[in-house]
Amino acid sequence: MDTATILWALLFGSIGLGYFIYGRRQSHAVARYTGIALMVCPYFVSNTVILVIVGISLLLLPKCLRL
């Protein structure tokens, strides 16, 4: 892992924690599961470009799915 991957993983993990807390308090299932996915995703994706693409798409997922 290089420095860029670690920093992106830290950023997406932090935002994922925020999504998870928001989803748990507001009973918003999409935000809760998106938060979990954002926190777990960096463990499985090692390529920086793919990590950024997957992370941004997961960040936009609760905005697209209004349930």
Image (spheres, rainbow, N blue to C red):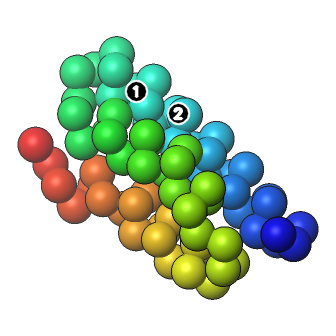
Helix, strand or loop at mark 1: helix
Please give left or right for residue 30 compared with residue 55 in the image: left
Please name the residue shown 56% across and 80% down the image.
50
Q: Position of residue 44 (x, y in %)?
A: 56, 62
Residues at discs 1 and 2 in contact (Cβ within 8 Å): yes
Q: Nearer the viewer, residue 30 or 43?
A: 43
Please name the residue shown 61% across and 58% down the image.
42
- Give the residue number, with chain letter if any, for mark 1: 22
Please give left or right for residue 30 compared with residue 35 in the image: left
* Figure check: 55 above or below 15: below
- Give the residue number, with chain letter if any, for mark 2: 18
Please name the residue shown 17% across and 55% down the image.
65
Q: Position of residue 43 (x, y in %)?
A: 61, 56
> In this view, which residue lies farthest toward the right?
3
Please name the residue shown 69% across and 78% down the image.
48
- Label 1 packing within 10 angstroms: few (<14), some (14-19), many (20+): some
> In this view, which residue lies farthest toward the top?
25
Please give left or right for residue 23 compared with residue 38 in the image: left
Please give left or right for residue 11 compared with residue 34 in the image: right
Q: Position of residue 18 (x, y in %)?
A: 52, 33
* Number of residue marks: 2
Instruction: Tell me the quadrant of the picture where the C terminus can be found.
Output: top left
Q: Looking at numbered disc 1 in the image, what kind of residue is underneath it?
A: Tyr
